[in-house]
Amino acid sequence: MSEKFDLPHESDMVPQKLELGSTIKFHCHKGVSCFNACCKQADLTLTPYDVIRLKDSLGMSSAEFLKAHTVPYQMDQHGVPGLKMRTDDTGACLFVTDEGCSVYANRPTACRYYPLGHMAMKHKDADSDETHYFLIQEDHCKGHEEPKEQTINEYRKELGIVDYDGYNKEWLQILLKKKSAGPTVGQPPESSLQLFFMASYDMDRFRRFVMSEQFRNTYDIEESSYEVLAKEDIALMQFGVRLMKQVFFGERTIAENKDAWEKRVEQRQPLWDMQREAEIARKQQEEDEKYKAD
Ligand code: SF4
Ligand code: SF4
Protein backbone atom coordinates (compact mmCIF):
# COMPACT_ATOMS: atom_id res chain seq x y z
CA MET A 1 0.00 0.00 0.00
CA SER A 2 1.45 3.39 -0.84
CA GLU A 3 0.23 6.91 -0.39
CA LYS A 4 1.62 10.25 -1.35
CA PHE A 5 1.20 13.32 0.76
CA ASP A 6 2.26 16.91 0.94
CA LEU A 7 2.83 17.44 -2.73
CA PRO A 8 3.72 21.12 -2.86
CA HIS A 9 2.07 21.80 -6.19
CA GLU A 10 -0.45 20.03 -8.41
CA SER A 11 1.20 18.17 -11.26
CA ASP A 12 -0.02 15.64 -13.87
CA MET A 13 3.42 14.23 -14.65
CA VAL A 14 4.41 10.67 -13.75
CA PRO A 15 7.32 11.02 -11.32
CA GLN A 16 10.64 9.21 -11.57
CA LYS A 17 11.41 7.65 -8.20
CA LEU A 18 14.58 9.04 -6.55
CA GLU A 19 16.44 8.11 -3.35
CA LEU A 20 18.35 10.25 -0.83
CA GLY A 21 21.64 9.63 -2.65
CA SER A 22 20.25 10.49 -6.11
CA THR A 23 21.74 13.58 -7.77
CA ILE A 24 19.49 16.39 -8.97
CA LYS A 25 20.39 19.37 -11.17
CA PHE A 26 18.58 22.40 -9.80
CA HIS A 27 19.28 25.79 -8.26
CA CYS A 28 16.83 28.49 -7.17
CA HIS A 29 18.29 31.94 -6.48
CA LYS A 30 17.44 35.61 -6.91
CA GLY A 31 19.13 35.73 -10.32
CA VAL A 32 16.80 33.22 -12.06
CA SER A 33 14.49 34.77 -14.67
CA CYS A 34 11.45 33.15 -13.01
CA PHE A 35 12.21 34.50 -9.53
CA ASN A 36 8.99 34.40 -7.44
CA ALA A 37 6.98 32.70 -10.23
CA CYS A 38 6.13 29.68 -8.05
CA CYS A 39 5.03 31.91 -5.14
CA LYS A 40 2.57 33.67 -7.45
CA GLN A 41 0.69 30.41 -8.01
CA ALA A 42 0.97 28.89 -4.55
CA ASP A 43 -1.00 25.82 -3.51
CA LEU A 44 0.50 25.04 -0.12
CA THR A 45 -0.61 22.49 2.42
CA LEU A 46 0.45 23.39 5.96
CA THR A 47 1.62 21.05 8.72
CA PRO A 48 1.22 21.78 12.46
CA TYR A 49 4.92 22.68 12.69
CA ASP A 50 4.55 25.11 9.75
CA VAL A 51 1.70 26.86 11.61
CA ILE A 52 3.74 27.19 14.82
CA ARG A 53 6.78 28.59 12.99
CA LEU A 54 4.74 31.07 10.95
CA LYS A 55 2.45 32.32 13.74
CA ASP A 56 5.43 32.82 16.09
CA SER A 57 7.44 34.67 13.46
CA LEU A 58 4.45 36.95 12.80
CA GLY A 59 3.75 37.45 16.52
CA MET A 60 0.19 36.14 16.15
CA SER A 61 -1.95 33.82 18.26
CA SER A 62 -2.93 30.58 16.55
CA ALA A 63 -6.52 31.84 16.14
CA GLU A 64 -5.32 35.10 14.53
CA PHE A 65 -3.01 33.22 12.17
CA LEU A 66 -5.67 30.67 11.16
CA LYS A 67 -8.13 33.46 10.38
CA ALA A 68 -5.76 35.69 8.43
CA HIS A 69 -3.58 33.20 6.58
CA THR A 70 -5.26 29.84 6.10
CA VAL A 71 -8.15 28.14 4.35
CA PRO A 72 -9.48 24.81 5.65
CA TYR A 73 -10.09 21.84 3.33
CA GLN A 74 -10.89 18.15 3.67
CA MET A 75 -7.90 15.83 3.28
CA ASP A 76 -9.91 12.67 2.69
CA GLN A 77 -13.42 11.30 2.15
CA HIS A 78 -13.98 11.19 5.92
CA GLY A 79 -13.46 14.93 6.25
CA VAL A 80 -10.10 14.87 8.08
CA PRO A 81 -9.36 18.61 8.21
CA GLY A 82 -6.35 20.06 6.41
CA LEU A 83 -5.09 23.61 6.01
CA LYS A 84 -3.96 25.49 2.93
CA MET A 85 -2.12 28.78 2.95
CA ARG A 86 -4.42 31.66 1.98
CA THR A 87 -3.58 33.41 -1.31
CA ASP A 88 -4.85 36.59 -2.93
CA ASP A 89 -7.42 36.51 -5.75
CA THR A 90 -4.73 35.83 -8.36
CA GLY A 91 -3.39 32.79 -6.45
CA ALA A 92 -0.29 34.59 -5.15
CA CYS A 93 1.01 33.83 -1.69
CA LEU A 94 0.35 36.68 0.76
CA PHE A 95 4.02 36.62 1.81
CA VAL A 96 5.62 37.15 -1.60
CA THR A 97 7.31 40.50 -2.23
CA ASP A 98 9.47 41.82 -5.07
CA GLU A 99 12.48 40.99 -2.90
CA GLY A 100 11.35 37.40 -2.37
CA CYS A 101 9.68 35.62 0.53
CA SER A 102 8.98 37.86 3.53
CA VAL A 103 8.89 34.86 5.88
CA TYR A 104 11.82 33.04 4.29
CA ALA A 105 13.41 31.74 7.53
CA ASN A 106 10.06 30.29 8.60
CA ARG A 107 8.56 29.36 5.21
CA PRO A 108 6.46 26.16 5.19
CA THR A 109 7.69 22.65 4.46
CA ALA A 110 6.11 22.58 1.00
CA CYS A 111 8.03 25.73 -0.05
CA ARG A 112 11.31 24.19 1.13
CA TYR A 113 10.68 20.98 -0.79
CA TYR A 114 9.66 22.50 -4.12
CA PRO A 115 10.52 21.34 -6.78
CA LEU A 116 11.13 18.12 -4.92
CA GLY A 117 8.11 15.95 -4.19
CA HIS A 118 8.12 13.20 -1.60
CA MET A 119 6.08 10.09 -1.22
CA ALA A 120 5.72 7.98 1.92
CA MET A 121 5.15 4.28 1.37
CA LYS A 122 3.98 1.87 3.99
CA HIS A 123 4.03 -1.78 3.08
CA LYS A 124 1.21 -3.67 4.70
CA ASP A 125 3.34 -5.83 7.02
CA ALA A 126 6.23 -3.39 7.57
CA ASP A 127 6.69 -1.68 10.94
CA SER A 128 7.86 1.62 9.49
CA ASP A 129 7.25 3.61 6.34
CA GLU A 130 9.84 4.62 3.76
CA THR A 131 10.12 7.80 1.73
CA HIS A 132 10.88 8.22 -1.96
CA TYR A 133 11.45 11.46 -3.80
CA PHE A 134 10.75 12.80 -7.28
CA LEU A 135 11.47 15.98 -9.17
CA ILE A 136 8.58 18.16 -10.35
CA GLN A 137 9.55 19.74 -13.67
CA GLU A 138 7.22 22.58 -14.58
CA ASP A 139 7.84 24.85 -17.59
CA HIS A 140 7.80 28.08 -15.59
CA CYS A 141 10.56 26.88 -13.24
CA LYS A 142 13.95 27.73 -14.76
CA GLY A 143 15.94 26.44 -11.79
CA HIS A 144 16.28 23.13 -13.66
CA GLU A 145 18.42 24.90 -16.28
CA GLU A 146 21.00 25.99 -13.68
CA PRO A 147 24.25 23.99 -13.56
CA LYS A 148 24.32 23.26 -9.79
CA GLU A 149 24.17 19.56 -8.92
CA GLN A 150 23.71 17.98 -5.49
CA THR A 151 22.24 14.89 -3.92
CA ILE A 152 18.76 14.96 -2.45
CA ASN A 153 20.32 14.54 0.97
CA GLU A 154 22.46 17.65 0.46
CA TYR A 155 19.47 19.58 -0.91
CA ARG A 156 17.36 18.63 2.16
CA LYS A 157 20.08 19.83 4.52
CA GLU A 158 20.69 23.07 2.64
CA LEU A 159 17.00 24.01 2.59
CA GLY A 160 16.35 23.14 6.26
CA ILE A 161 14.07 20.27 5.28
CA VAL A 162 15.71 17.75 7.61
CA ASP A 163 14.60 19.65 10.74
CA TYR A 164 11.10 20.24 9.39
CA ASP A 165 10.74 16.58 8.42
CA GLY A 166 11.74 15.60 11.96
CA TYR A 167 8.91 17.65 13.44
CA ASN A 168 6.37 16.69 10.75
CA LYS A 169 7.02 12.96 10.73
CA GLU A 170 4.81 11.74 13.58
CA TRP A 171 1.85 13.86 12.46
CA LEU A 172 2.15 12.72 8.84
CA GLN A 173 2.19 9.15 10.13
CA ILE A 174 -1.35 9.65 11.44
CA LEU A 175 -2.54 10.49 7.91
CA LEU A 176 -0.58 7.64 6.38
CA LYS A 177 -1.76 5.15 8.96
CA LYS A 178 -5.38 6.17 8.55
CA LYS A 179 -5.13 5.79 4.78
CA SER A 180 -3.24 2.49 5.03
CA ALA A 181 -5.83 1.08 7.42
CA GLY A 182 -8.53 1.77 4.82
CA PRO A 183 -12.13 1.12 5.82
CA THR A 184 -11.17 -0.61 9.11
CA VAL A 185 -10.72 2.81 10.76
CA GLY A 186 -13.91 4.08 9.12
CA GLN A 187 -15.60 7.42 9.58
CA PRO A 188 -14.26 9.12 12.73
CA PRO A 189 -16.95 10.81 14.86
CA GLU A 190 -17.31 14.58 14.53
CA SER A 191 -15.72 15.08 17.98
CA SER A 192 -12.54 13.25 16.84
CA LEU A 193 -12.31 15.42 13.72
CA GLN A 194 -12.69 18.54 15.87
CA LEU A 195 -9.93 17.27 18.15
CA PHE A 196 -7.75 16.64 15.08
CA PHE A 197 -8.17 20.24 13.91
CA MET A 198 -7.56 21.75 17.34
CA ALA A 199 -4.57 19.54 18.28
CA SER A 200 -3.02 19.96 14.82
CA TYR A 201 -3.40 23.66 14.12
CA ASP A 202 -4.91 25.68 16.96
CA MET A 203 -2.31 25.41 19.74
CA ASP A 204 -3.81 28.14 21.95
CA ARG A 205 -7.24 26.49 22.05
CA PHE A 206 -5.68 23.03 22.43
CA ARG A 207 -3.65 24.32 25.38
CA ARG A 208 -6.82 25.58 27.10
CA PHE A 209 -8.43 22.18 26.48
CA VAL A 210 -5.45 20.26 27.92
CA MET A 211 -5.29 22.56 30.96
CA SER A 212 -9.04 22.26 31.65
CA GLU A 213 -10.34 20.53 34.73
CA GLN A 214 -12.25 18.02 32.60
CA PHE A 215 -9.06 16.96 30.81
CA ARG A 216 -7.12 16.70 34.07
CA ASN A 217 -9.88 14.54 35.52
CA THR A 218 -9.72 12.22 32.52
CA TYR A 219 -5.95 11.76 32.05
CA ASP A 220 -3.28 10.85 34.57
CA ILE A 221 -0.43 13.23 33.73
CA GLU A 222 2.44 14.47 35.93
CA GLU A 223 2.21 18.12 37.06
CA SER A 224 5.72 18.70 35.64
CA SER A 225 4.43 17.66 32.18
CA TYR A 226 1.56 20.14 32.46
CA GLU A 227 4.09 22.88 33.23
CA VAL A 228 5.92 22.12 29.98
CA LEU A 229 2.69 21.89 27.96
CA ALA A 230 1.58 25.25 29.37
CA LYS A 231 4.67 26.97 27.93
CA GLU A 232 6.00 25.11 24.89
CA ASP A 233 4.12 24.82 21.61
CA ILE A 234 6.37 22.09 20.19
CA ALA A 235 5.87 19.89 23.27
CA LEU A 236 2.13 20.56 23.06
CA MET A 237 2.10 19.66 19.36
CA GLN A 238 3.91 16.38 20.09
CA PHE A 239 1.52 15.62 22.95
CA GLY A 240 -1.37 16.33 20.56
CA VAL A 241 -0.04 13.72 18.13
CA ARG A 242 0.02 11.12 20.94
CA LEU A 243 -3.52 12.05 21.95
CA MET A 244 -4.74 11.80 18.35
CA LYS A 245 -3.10 8.38 17.93
CA GLN A 246 -4.84 7.30 21.13
CA VAL A 247 -8.22 8.57 19.93
CA PHE A 248 -7.95 7.38 16.30
CA PHE A 249 -6.06 4.09 16.66
CA GLY A 250 -6.30 3.16 20.33
CA GLU A 251 -2.51 3.51 20.83
CA ARG A 252 -2.52 4.08 24.59
CA THR A 253 0.50 6.21 25.51
CA ILE A 254 -1.33 8.66 27.81
CA ALA A 255 -2.56 7.08 31.03
CA GLU A 256 -6.21 7.62 31.87
CA ASN A 257 -7.42 8.06 35.42
CA LYS A 258 -8.91 4.80 36.63
CA ASP A 259 -12.05 6.44 37.96
CA ALA A 260 -12.38 8.92 35.07
CA TRP A 261 -15.51 7.24 33.69
CA GLU A 262 -17.17 7.00 37.11
CA LYS A 263 -16.39 10.70 37.78
CA ARG A 264 -17.80 11.68 34.40
CA VAL A 265 -20.98 9.71 35.12
CA GLU A 266 -21.22 11.33 38.54
CA GLN A 267 -20.83 14.83 37.04
CA ARG A 268 -23.37 14.23 34.30
CA GLN A 269 -25.89 12.24 36.34
CA PRO A 270 -27.99 15.30 37.37
CA LEU A 271 -28.20 16.38 33.71
CA TRP A 272 -29.20 12.88 32.57
CA ASP A 273 -31.82 12.69 35.36
CA MET A 274 -33.22 16.03 34.26
CA GLN A 275 -33.35 14.93 30.61
CA ARG A 276 -35.09 11.66 31.59
CA GLU A 277 -37.68 13.48 33.68
CA ALA A 278 -38.31 15.97 30.87
CA GLU A 279 -38.81 13.09 28.43
CA ILE A 280 -41.25 11.33 30.81
CA ALA A 281 -43.18 14.60 31.23
CA ARG A 282 -43.30 15.10 27.46
CA LYS A 283 -44.67 11.57 26.89
CA GLN A 284 -47.20 12.03 29.70
CA GLN A 285 -48.39 15.25 28.08
CA GLU A 286 -48.74 13.52 24.70
CA GLU A 287 -50.88 10.79 26.31
CA ASP A 288 -53.03 13.40 28.09
CA GLU A 289 -53.57 15.27 24.80
CA LYS A 290 -54.58 11.98 23.13
CA TYR A 291 -57.22 11.20 25.79
CA LYS A 292 -58.53 14.76 25.61
CA ALA A 293 -58.94 14.37 21.85
CA ASP A 294 -60.69 10.98 22.30
S1 SF4 B 1 5.72 31.33 1.99
FE1 SF4 B 1 7.39 32.36 0.95
S2 SF4 B 1 8.37 30.74 -0.28
FE2 SF4 B 1 6.35 29.99 0.30
S3 SF4 B 1 4.99 30.54 -1.39
FE3 SF4 B 1 4.89 32.19 0.13
S4 SF4 B 1 6.39 33.70 -0.55
FE4 SF4 B 1 6.85 31.78 -1.59
S1 SF4 C 1 13.54 28.60 -9.99
FE1 SF4 C 1 11.63 27.49 -9.63
S2 SF4 C 1 11.50 27.46 -7.41
FE2 SF4 C 1 12.94 29.11 -7.94
S3 SF4 C 1 11.72 30.98 -8.14
FE3 SF4 C 1 11.83 30.06 -10.17
S4 SF4 C 1 9.94 28.85 -10.27
FE4 SF4 C 1 10.30 29.23 -8.11
Image (tube, rainbow, N blue to C red):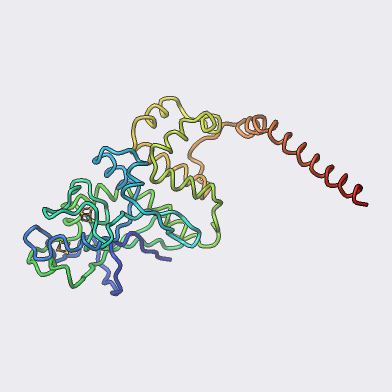
Locate residue 71, reporting x and y percent.
36, 54
Q: Is residue 162 above or below residue 209?
A: below
Locate residue 135, reporting x and y percent.
23, 67
Q: Residue at x 35, y 46 (%)?
A: 66
Q: Residue at x 41, y 57 (%)?
A: 73
Locate residue 233, reporting x and y percent.
34, 37
Of 287 and 140, the residue lying toward us: 287
Q: Residue at x 33, y 63 (%)?
A: 119
Q: Quadrant of residue 258?
A: top right
Q: Quadrant of residue 39?
A: bottom left
Locate residue 252, reporting x and y percent.
51, 42
Residue found at the far top of this picture: 223
Q: Is residue 160 left or right of residue 76?
A: left
Q: Is residue 157 left or right of residue 169?
A: left
Residue found at the far front of this picture: 293
Q: Quadrant of residue 33?
A: bottom left
Q: Is residue 233 left or right of residue 254?
A: left
Quarter holding the N terminus is bottom left
Q: Residue at x 43, y 38 (%)?
A: 206
Of 152 and 284, the residue lying toward us: 284
Q: How many marks?
A: 0
Ligand 1 image-quadrant field: bottom left
